[in-house]
Image (spheres, rainbow, N blue to C red):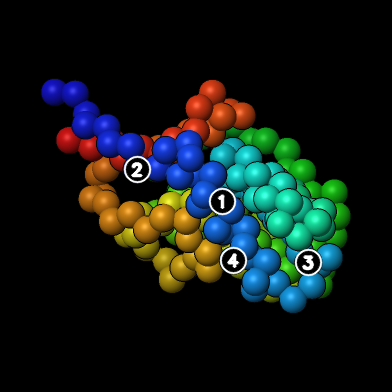
Amino acid sequence: MSAKVVEILSSEEIRRTLTRLASQIVERTRDLSQLVLLGIYTRGALLAELLARQIETLEGVAVSVGALDITFYRDDLDTIGLRTPTKSEIPFDLTGKTVVLVDDVIFKGRTIRAALNAVNDYGRPEVIRLAVLVDRGHRELPIHPDFIGKKLPTAKEEVVKVYLQNYDGRDAVELIGD
């Protein structure tokens, strides 16, 4: 039996969602010169770049962007399998900054827990917030996003797949299940 695939967000809906998220981030940030968007590899890093461009379009301010690899901070490598690490790209100190972690999907919260641990290696931010394109629930840790593109109640066995043009050749969010 083949899995059922349902498109949750189209390319246009992703564009509108990112515009809304960028606006919300701007509204909650006192000083945009202190804002850093830190994307979690892989698609979170791409989303951080897209959000930074949108903030620059909205506000005329260039926002610092970095990419964070959390491979060595994960507590679930035994269940998800070994991953090839990617070099984090954070060419600035995070001390005193407003850091917005960016990821594509939040599920159990373990990726974000690992990201919070990794951030400590790059300084002590004034505040850390979390932006996600999709929140699918089922948290195992007390971690909740500050900025949510789409809340999507799912069954635990379903999969949410994010596709981004710069990496996958198309923009879409799909729910895959039975």
Query: Mark 4 belongs to which amino acid?
Result: Gln
Residue shown at the point (59%, 38%) measured from the top left = 42
At label 2, the amino acid type is Ile
Mark 1 = which residue? 18
Marks 4 and 2: CB-CB under 8 Å?
A: no
Residue beneath disc 2: 8
In three-dimensional space, the C-alpha distance between marks 2 and 3, rounded to whole angstroms, equals: 31 Å
- Whichever of labels 4 and 2 marks the residue nearer the N terminus, that label is 2
Q: CA distance from mark 4 to mark 2?
A: 21 Å
Q: Quadrant of residue 177?
A: top left
**Residue 58 in the image: x percent, y percent?**
71, 57
Residue drawn at 58 percent across, 53 percent down? 19
Residue 122 seen anywhere in this rendered image of the structure: no
Residue 78, image x and y in percent?
Answer: 43, 42
Disc 4 marks which residue? 24
Q: Quadrant of the C terminus?
A: top left
Task: Say which residue appears at 55% left-offset and 58% top-offset.
Answer: 20
Q: Is residue 141 left or right of residue 114?
A: left
| Label located before the other in sequence (1 or 3) | 1
Give the amino acid at mark 3. Answer: Leu
Q: Secondary structure at mark 3?
A: helix
In the image, taking residue 167 as reference, residue 52 lies left or right, namely: right
What is the secondary structure assignment of the residue under circle 2? strand
Tell me the amino acid under the disc marked 1: Leu
Q: Which residue is mark 3?
A: 32
Q: Nearer the viewer, residue 86 or 102?
A: 102
Which is nearer the N-term, disc 2 or disc 1?
2
Task: Give the spatial CA distance, label 1 vs label 4.
Answer: 10 Å
Q: Are marks 1 and 3 in contact (CB under 8 Å)?
A: no
